[in-house]
Image (cartoon, rainbow, N blue to C red):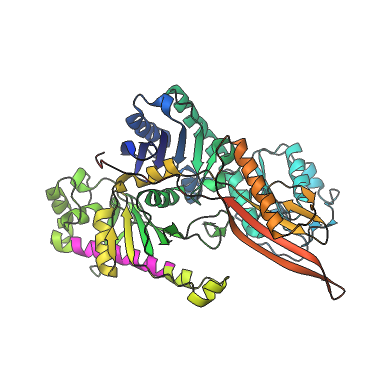
Amino acid sequence: MLLGIDVGGTFTDGVLVDSTEVLAQAKRKTTHENVLHGILAALDAVLGNNASKIERVVISSTIVTNALTEHKLDPVFLATIPGPGMNTKGKFPVEAMEITGYIDHRGKCTAPINWTKHRNLTNMQGKGAAAVSGKFSVRDSSLERELARQLKEQGFAPVFRGAALNGELNFVRRTNSAYYAAATYELFNKFFQAVQRALQERSVVAPIFILKADGGTLPLAEALKQPVEAIFTGPAASVLGIEALVAPDLPAISLDVGGTTTDIAFWEHGMPLMAKHGATVDGYPTAVRTFHMRSVGIGGDSAITKKADGSYQVGPMRQGTAAALGGNEPTFGDALVVSGRANFGDVNKSVAALAKFGDAKLEAEKIVAAAVATIKNTIDTMLAEWALQPVYTVEDVLKGTEFQPKLLVGVGGGATGLINALGEEMGLQVQIPQGAMVANAIGAALSRPTLSAGLRADTTEGFYLIAEEGQKRELPGGFGMKKAENILSEYLRNATAKWNLPDQEVEIISKEFFNTIHGYYDSGEIINLRMQLKPGVLNKLKVKNEKL
């Protein structure tokens, strides 16, 4: 049996699944003052007498996302090795201490760290987490590792290295990933230690996994080494839930309508589209791989504001419980009830709450239309952004990168009312699968373990480097792209074996090679390759009962 827990802005969902169906499901209020309480309420509702049968626990939590959104981050000492000629002002969330030394673009150390110049660092008394990152450290991490060792000697702990977190070349993205990993580590660690204790108290001894933004999972011990990967796991969980329940064959847009937000993703050939670049946090780009998604601050509990011109704004603030369920103020959920698009609670209470704006039914239609317009505008922006993506393949040149949706897929508690209204506005057919109410928890429970890594080889210099490992190695005979794929695939599978997990499919994220020229003649090749254990769901599910 697999146990999945998803912590949303309004509800915390739990599911217990076997290989083909949902055995138990529950939806409980998210307790923002203590998220663990809501998790345990959902857990206890689905666990029953099955503690000894649980094989794996996967948690999708907003704990990291909320900390980033609310700027509740621990102070971090950030040190970088940018090399000559690079202006990093304003590129990072905090001002970094710039350290001398330089690894050039070929991975050669052309200047060591001048520790005499950095006596202020070697004399300081460190405290808390730190992050270090070097411009070309993915091609030689020696200076980055030397700097990390020095910070540990000064008392900083833990120390996160950019190249160890991600093998992408982009220096700014790697640096920001290291910073956010350090800034959220203590919160992440305390929270999941509490989760571990709670599961042990309930005699659940199965391994705990954390959902990542790209739809894969990491064992808790690995996730603690890179907590930044836990951002945006809520939207990722909804994508995986849809893949497990329905996986649309047509080009589709999925919407997960919760109490606080609506998360939007694109689908083609039954698979979610990935963002071309990493996730962005508070305007700062990171190397965290994620889906092409957007969250809109509209959900069933969203506040309603009537403007001076008679139009409405829905969200982004959360009002709380709908009047239909006993709340004091009308919410977007009340507008769905009064307009006949949702059926919960006491419709008369919703009518009375909306009456303060005028004729309840007329105003409800205006409110729904305002929410639909906001979401449609977001979708239009996402479509435009996708169409502007650079083309990389012959197929892209011939077909273009334009995405033309033909279907809307809805999950989440507020899906039925909102998705149908949006479908009418956009002229698209609508699909709401069985299990939509707890799709996120289903996605978490069934998510595959995943890991990515990058390899760079220089046949002229005779070495290759897997950035996440950090060690240069001599090239074997007959080296080429195929052998590079075999080496990196073996590295990923060995990492999986350390987790005591079964072997799984490895896929290529990107690959490229360049000829090196010396004296007008080819002297070798530079090969760049990135691969990963393929994320997604373990299997599809059947849902027999929607009752919560």
- Residue 375 is inside the magenta segment: yes
Label the magenta part by its dominant secondary structure: helix
Quadrant in the picture for residue 530:
bottom right
Asked whether, in this view, residue 47 is left or right of residue 472, the answer is left
Whether residue 520 sits left or right of residue 221 in the image: it is right
Q: Residue at x 42, y 45 (%)?
A: 539
Quarter of image, res 126: top right
Q: Is residue 534 visible?
A: yes
Q: Position of residue 5 (x, y in %)?
A: 40, 38
Is residue 506 or residue 119 the one in the foreground?
A: 506
The part of the chain drawn in magenta is: 364-382
In the image, taking residue 138 as reference, residue 450 lies left or right, namely left
State the residue lying farthest toward the front.
478
| Residue 288 pos. (x, y %) | 56, 53
Residue 130 vertical placement versus 528 (above, below): above
Q: Is residue 30 visible?
A: no
Question: Which is more toward the observer, 45 or 373?
Answer: 45
Give the image location of residue 547, x and y in percent: 24, 40
516 up-or-down from 159: above or below: below
The residue at 37%/37% (across/down) is: 17
Q: Is residue 339 above or below residue 495?
A: below
For residue 234: magenta?
no
Name which residue lies at 16% across and 56% down: 340
How far across and down, in percent of the image, does residue 48 sit?
34, 26
In the rendered image, the quadrant that contains the C terminus is top left
Q: How many marks on residues?
A: 0
Quadrant of the snapshot with the N terminus: top left
Which of these two is toward me, 380 or 395? 395
